[in-house]
Amino acid sequence: MSTQIIRDWSRAQVHFVGIGGSGMSGIARIMASRGAQVSGSDLNDSSTLNGLRSLGAKIYIGHSLDNLGSPDLVIKSSAIPANNPELEEAHKKGITVLERAAALAELMIGTRSVAVAGTHGKTTTTSMLTVALQHVGLDPSFAIGATVSNSGTNAHQGSGNTFIVEADESDGSFTAYKPLGAIITNIELDHVDNFATLAQIDQIFDDFAATIRAEGFLVLCSDDPGALRLMARVKEKNLPISITTYGIDSQADLRLDRIHLQPKSAEARVSYKGRVLAVMELAITGRHNLLNAAAALLAGLELGANANDLIKGLS
């Protein structure tokens, strides 16, 4: 979405239908932090909804057309059926209704946004990038499918202009985001209810890469066959973006070697374009987590952060 629907969140009233899920509640939290009057409904109460109440949101348990009021915008969860009374009332009143991904895209307009996608590892990588940027002194906004331990929340309105989001490819809606940069950790056949073949998965990631803004960047894992296929197609199309790679592969721009795995930790030497940077030590084990951290490090470098500070943040 490139045309901004809400230009001044402090004057906006926004109603969420299905506000309790991780994605929806995160968007509601950010909108409330920007000054919007937030209301929403869900079938069950939860600690998540209590957190939104503490930000001033009006929460209804159960769905009823009486919940709607006269908001400027309605945001619906993908789990909500078309015959939901609040949605039907919104359509009768001519109120704009957005899906979750389109609403998040609305918040990302005008920011230095990075969207993290991939079949595996996107939640961890998004969290790692957020924490690393916090360590270097930035206060990024973020919307993630899990709680960031340093912040105690899955979403936050930062004080700066950087916005980190987890991009879910399961229904193809991540093509709404139009980020400055993107990380793609890996590409495999998944979500077979929506994508019957690997070719269909490849196509949706092609579509996603094509939404990266001109002069933006794409970070890919050079150890992953799916990511390498995507890189070849992006280069063939001459998209106006830079591509950088990470991995254990000797041709990676950001390379990991001298890997040591312990039961509760992992470390690797990090080199960038042939120059050794440092040894990166993680407080979790697993080669896959070292790769996730490498992706976060490379995206942080693309955003202009200092390498050693980022590595300390990841450690």
Image (cartoon, rainbow, N blue to C red):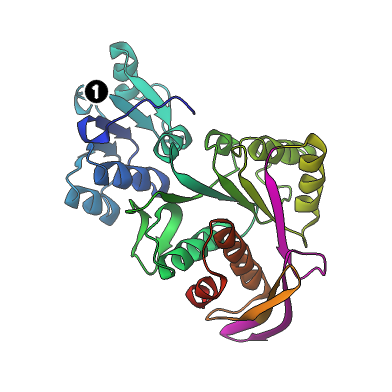
In this rendering, does residue 168 appear at all? yes
**Residue 20 seen:** no
- Left or right of 178 on screen, residue 86: left
Q: Pointer 1: residues within 10 angstroms few (<14), some, or many (20+)?
A: few
User: Percent position (x, y) of residue 81?
Assistant: 43, 27
Position of 146 compared to 86: left or right?
A: right
Q: Which residues are magenta?
A: 240-267
Residue 40 at x, y = what percent?
Answer: 26, 36
Q: Say which residue label 1 marks.
A: 65
Q: Residue at x 76, y 41 (%)?
A: 234
Name the spot of residue 190 as percent of width and height, x first: 68, 47
Q: Would you place residue 285 above or below residue 75 in this image? A: below
Q: Which residue is at a point 37% across and 25% down the rendered structure image?
A: 5
Q: Main secondary structure of the magenta part?
A: strand
Q: Amino acid type of disc 1?
A: Leu
Residue 17 quadrant? top left
- Residue 245 falls left or right of residue 290: right
In x, y percent, where is residue 236? 82, 38
Pick the residue in front: 25 or 103.
103
